[in-house]
Image: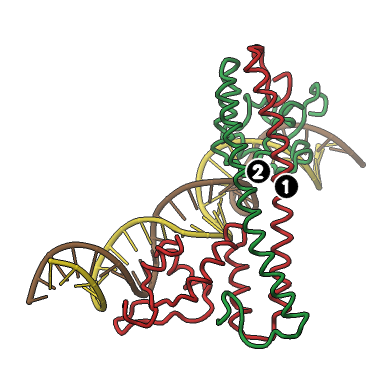
Chain colours: A green, B red, C brown, D yellow
Amino acid sequence: MTRNAGGLSIGQVAERTGLSVHALRFFEREDLFLGPIRRSAGGQRVYDPADVEWLLLCNRFRDSGMSIATMKRFAELVRSGPGNERDRLALLEEHERTVQARIAELTASLEVIHDKVATYRRHVEDGTATGLWSPTPGR
Amino acid sequence: MTRNAGGLSIGQVAERTGLSVHALRFFEREDLFLGPIRRSAGGQRVYDPADVEWLLLCNRFRDSGMSIATMKRFAELVRSGPGNERDRLALLEEHERTVQARIAELTASLEVIHDKVATYRRHVEDGTATGLWSPTPGR
DNA sequence: CTAAAACCTAGAGTTCTCTCTAGGTCAAGC
DNA sequence: GCTTGACCTAGAGAGAACTCTAGGTTTTAG
């Protein structure tokens, strides 16, 4: 398989993308690729570098919380060729807003958590941590 | 139930916390509360305001990605009374770091996504969006 | 007093995203 | 040519976090 012009085995792709071979087969079943994956004479998958690029982008999407379903919609748009760039853009923009919102939410929660940390730190450092305390002074 | 000094029914707590009554029972089964929930003569749950406070904090934890298992560990620490404030602090600090890391990760992904958005925007606005393009120029 | 709304338990079902298994086949090195 | 490791398919299993169901009891409003 190493001789197919630039062709990569599933194991090699797994290595390069950090995805498991199981996950790669799963992604294919879910139609997450931009086109059918080639097969060797023996029936084994042969990926090409563009697939790896796409998977790396998918990793970004996944890491940023995009669902498989949404990635699938994006893949469908790309697969159906030029002409729907507006739709792709809309999808990306919406995801961008989602991520921004998530960051804002996390930042807000972080503040609350940090306050808790600060309070505990004072208690612990002062040794004043006697007496119940926690979710609310009083429990 | 409305007469138990400050006592709240499960429905009232659901309303105040945004959690479903199912979720509240589930949380209880999972030992996520700081103490046993009282029951009315008829066997219905009677919560008090401190429980609501705790649940609101739990919501913060959940929103920031803390697992039920971790919340449970924190609840256990609080339940087992004073003396383990260092452990609670450590748990909170670790969660704080986790959240910070997650924000960093999201921020990095956001940048990549924003670049994609910018590229698509150019393509769409210029009307130059002819020819395939997407995961990588060339597919 | 009675109907309706809210609550109860135990446990099954759901969704999402993989992961693992079983039972083979293919490919590469010695 | 044979062993070993990588790969194949179809489908079951996992775990996280709920959600829903069934069948029954308790509360509340009128």
Residue A90, compared with residue A17, is above or below; it is above
Residue A46 visible at all: no
Three-letter code, disc 1: Glu
Three-letter code, disc 2: Ser
Image quarter (top left, top right, bottom left or bottom right) of the N terminus of chain B: bottom left
- Camera-nearest residue between A26 and B27: B27
Q: Position of residue A24 (x, y in %)?
A: 66, 38
| CB-based contact (under 8 Å), mark 1 and mark 2 | yes
Image quarter (top left, top right, bottom left or bottom right) of the C terminus of chain B: top right
Q: Chain of mark 1?
A: B
Q: Position of residue A94 (x, y in %)?
A: 57, 34
| Residue placed under numbered mark 2 in the picture | A64
Residue B4 visible at all: yes
Q: Secondary structure at mark 2?
A: loop
Residue drawn at the location 66% of the way across and 27% of the way down: A37
Q: Chain of mark 2?
A: A
- Camera-nearest residue between D8 and B24: B24
* Disc sitting over residue B105 in the figure: 1
Residue B24, compared with residue C14, is above or below; it is below
Left or right? Give the position of B14 relative to D23: right
The image quarter containing residue C7 is bottom left
